[in-house]
Image: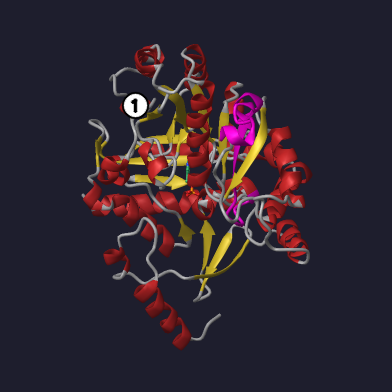
């Protein structure tokens, strides 16, 4: 633990030089910075020695807890061989092994693995693959995309172009290519004001209208399967994904599934699309890929996509894309260790009781005056706070109600981060039931404290 003088120095440097992502730095400067020094299991410890439960898996990526011995050892072993070599030309052992395993566990048909280093680049690669695929198939007008309202696929200009969250994406509008936005199946705030029981998927009908009218111009649909993460942990009704899959096939449009958040057990299965037996043409993976240890991502594609890029060198059909740290051996070694843990520790099998426990214990949140909806998919939970439960009037952005709840939770030893007025709970898959109870207890208390304050 740093002594108090050094701690003050760290705080000064943090405020002075570190520009934090997705953070209003004017507010940040007013609060005491939380500086993490170490982690162990689902706990993180700050420079004062105070412990917190990592309630959002260090931004939705940690799976097995911190300092997981098997992953630590795998990285150390690889470090004794080599830290980084390039995939532009040569190959490396962990990258080869991981590609083989990913192809084995992936939904049917996804046999080709293209590495990059984060979720945004995994999706950027997916979009470029889909685009170039059609160019090389001779359908040169297929240059546009379909995405969902409230969708989030990353922060590069390309992936922001298919993003549907106004507060993040609107300001950059002039930089984007053409994307058609279909309504999100956000049943709590159904854009058609219908009830899930008898809506007959009006949202899919609207999607079909878009596809039918523009199919000659659309190359691919990109969608987060089952849960739209950054858009508010919007959980989709069963049947939406398989419906969208069928419509894409019918109208000759590729389907890109962004499993950056939902992949690797988060929803209870290895990949979310397996819940509906859907296999996409392209799939992006990142966050959980190596248990949340190092930057690594992969874009998986079918033989059909891959084959369209084969040709004589002079034909320029090559996929001219690649990053310096593509297929980094340390990241891939960590991923291999993480996937081995899925087998050795029966991760998916052991999730079932935790998911059920979460479901049962989220019930009481529904009774809270300012909780409009409780959403859950696997070990992902979200509580949508509303000013008025009857009218569903949301809290306004400026009230910072989500931030206030999370600051209260932090005081009580829980680290969570909101999405506006939506409180997100997404612990590592390794969480124990009693630890899950602590998270729920503190979250409940914090919501009560903050929303009571406001009345
Ligand atoms: C986090 C996320 C991304 C972006 O990943 P980064 O690694 O932050 O670039 C893309 N898609 C989804 C669904 C995500 O949750």
* The N terminus, quarter of image: bottom right
Badge 1 marks a residue whose secondary structure is strand
Q: Residue furthest front?
A: 314
Q: How is the image coloured?
A: secondary structure
Magenta span includes 308: yes
Q: Is residue 21 above or below residue 384?
A: below
Q: Is residue 232 above or below residue 190?
A: below
Note whether residue 41 is visible: yes
The x, y position of residue 207, in whole percent, is: 38, 18
The x, y position of residue 176, in whole percent, is: 32, 39
Q: Is residue 387 above or below residue 193?
A: below
Q: Is residue 420 above or below residue 415?
A: above
Identify the residue shown where x is 56% and y is 35%. Answer: 316
**In this rendering, position of residue 348 left or right of residue 320:** right
Q: Nearer the viewer, residue 290 or 110?
A: 110
Magenta span includes 180: no
* Residue 158: quarter of image: top left
Q: Nearer the viewer, residue 341 or 390?
A: 341
The x, y position of residue 110, in whole percent, is: 65, 29
Q: Nearer the viewer, residue 76 or 34?
A: 76
Identify the residue shown where x is 75% and y is 39%. Answer: 100
How many labels sit on residues? 1
Range of magenta residues: 290-316
Q: Nearer the viewer, residue 42 or 60?
A: 60
Note whether residue 369 is visible: no
**In this rendering, position of residue 430 left or right of residue 81:** left
State the residue position of label 1. Answer: 180
The x, y position of residue 298, in whole percent, is: 60, 42
């Amino acid at each position: 633990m740093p002594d108090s003088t050094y701690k003050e120095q760290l705080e000064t440097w943090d405020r002075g030089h570190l520009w934090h992502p997705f953070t209003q730095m004017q507010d940040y400067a007013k609060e005491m910075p939380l500086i993490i020094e170490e982690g162990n299991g689902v706990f993180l410890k700050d420079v004062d020695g105070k412990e917190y439960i990592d309630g959002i898996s260090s931004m939705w990526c940690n799976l097995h807890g911190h300092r997981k011995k098997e992953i630590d050892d795998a990285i150390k072993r690889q470090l004794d061989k080599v830290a980084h070599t390039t995939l532009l030309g040569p190959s490396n052992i962990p990258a080869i092994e991981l590609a083989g395993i990913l192809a084995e566990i992936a939904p049917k048909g996804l046999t080709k693995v293209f590495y990059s280093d984060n979720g945004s680049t995994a999706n950027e690669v997916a979009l470029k693959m889909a685009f170039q695929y059609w160019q090389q198939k001779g359908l040169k007008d297929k240059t546009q995309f379909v995405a969902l309202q409230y969708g989030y696929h990353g922060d590069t200009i390309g992936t922001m172009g298919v993003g549907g969250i106004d507060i993040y994406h609107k300001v950059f509008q002039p930089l984007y290519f053409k994307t058609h936005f279909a309504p999100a199946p956000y049943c709590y705030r159904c854009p058609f004001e219908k009830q899930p029981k008898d809506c007959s998927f009006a949202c899919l009908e609207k999607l079909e209208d878009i596809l039918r009218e523009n199919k000659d111009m659309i190359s691919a649909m990109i969608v987060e399967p089952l849960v739209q993460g950054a858009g508010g942990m919007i959980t989709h009704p069963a049947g939406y994904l398989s419906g969208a899959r069928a419509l894409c096939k019918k109208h000759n449009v590729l389907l890109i599934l962004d499993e950056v958040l939902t992949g690797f057990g988060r929803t209870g299965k290895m990949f979310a699309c397996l819940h509906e037996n859907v296999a996409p043409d392209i799939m992006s993976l990142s966050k959980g890929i190596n248990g949340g240890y190092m930057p690594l991502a992969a874009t998986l594609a079918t033989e059909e996509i891959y084959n369209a890029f084969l040709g004589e060198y002079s034909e320029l059909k090559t996929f001219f894309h690649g990053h310096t740290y593509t297929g980094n051996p340390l990241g891939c070694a960590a991923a291999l260790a993480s996937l081995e843990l899925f087998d050795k520790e029966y991760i998916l099998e052991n999730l079932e009781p935790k998911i059920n426990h979460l479901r049962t214990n989220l019930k009481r949140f529904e009774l809270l005056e300012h909780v409009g909806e409780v959403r859950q998919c696997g070990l992902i939970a979200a509580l949508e706070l509303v000013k008025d439960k009857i009218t569903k009037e949301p809290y306004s952005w400026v009230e910072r109600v989500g931030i206030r709840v999370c600051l209260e939770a932090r005081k009580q030893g829980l680290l969570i981060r909101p999405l506006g007025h939506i409180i997100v709970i997404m612990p590592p898959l390794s969480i124990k039931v009693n630890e899950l109870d602590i998270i729920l207890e503190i979250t409940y208390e914090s919501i009560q404290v903050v929303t009571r304050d406001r009345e």
